[in-house]
Amino acid sequence: MSEMPIMNRSDIEAIIPHREPFILVDEVTEMDDEHIVAHKFVRADEYYFQGHFPEMPVMPGVLIVESMAQAGAIVALKKPENKGKIAFFAGIDKVRFKKSVFPGDTMRLEVRMTRQRGPIGFGEGKAYVGDSLCASAEIMFAVGDAKKD
């Protein structure tokens, strides 16, 4: 990979609460207040490949979208006013799957935050393998406290 990471897994885990086996972002190579470029290294030993599908392992589409959401959460939760909070999925629109993602692929996640009003925000995400678009979605999130009431 030509781009050097600016955040590794431990840096990411310091921002979002996701952990194995459900953390789906491995590194960040580009980020500012509104966008992020991150990567997910799709491993053959990922738990979901045992049943999806044993004869032809394909990354589930919902997990591709979750990967985009986690990348967007890094942007949202990196802001000083959101430190120590959690970003919850609040909605998904216009999801399109174009190409399958397989073990051994490196998925590039590109998410741009489009607007935020109070704790509710919106973003546009895309997932690529190489130059091929695999999935796109509009994502809505809500930032809240990280403790359970």
Image (cartoon, grey):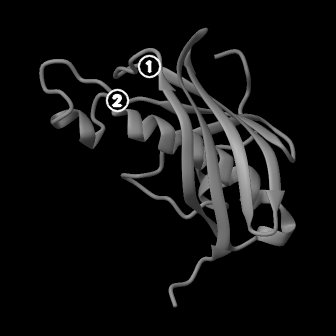
Query: Residue 142: x and y, percent?
Result: 65, 64
Q: Secondary structure at mark 1?
A: loop
Q: Quadrant of residue 137?
A: top right
The answer to whether the residue labelled 2 contacts the one labelled 1, judged by CB atoms less than 8 Å apart, is: yes
Instruction: Identify the mark at residue 105; answer none if there is no mark.
Output: 1
What residue sits 81% from the left and 69% below the top? 118
Q: Is residue 92 left or right of residue 100?
A: right
Query: Residue 32: x and y, percent?
Result: 86, 42
What residue sits 65% from the left and 74% below the top? 144
Front-most of 35 and 141?
141
What residue sits 46% from the left and 58% below the top? 19
Q: Is residue 88 left or right of residue 80?
A: left
Q: Secondary structure at mark 2?
A: loop
Q: Residue furthest bottom?
A: 149
Q: Quadrant of residue 83?
A: bottom right
Q: Nearer the viewer, mark 2 or mark 1?
A: 2
Q: Residue furthest left?
A: 55
Instruction: Identify the mark at residue 59; answer none if there is no mark.
Output: 2
Q: Quadrant of residue 90?
A: bottom right
Q: Is residue 36 left or right of residue 98?
A: right
Front-most of 45 and 83?
83
Instruction: Identify the mark at residue 141; answer none if there is no mark.
Output: none
Q: Quadrant of the N terminus?
A: top right
Q: Residue furthest top?
A: 131
* Tally of numbered tags: 2
Q: Earlier in the sequence, mark 2 or mark 1?
A: 2
Query: Residue 52: x and y, percent?
Result: 21, 32
Mark 1 residue type: Asp
CA distance for labels 2 and 1: 10 Å
Mark 2 residue type: Met
Query: Residue 149: x and y, percent?
Result: 52, 91
Q: Give the crowd class for mark 1: few <14, some 14-19, many >=20 residues within 10 Å.
A: some
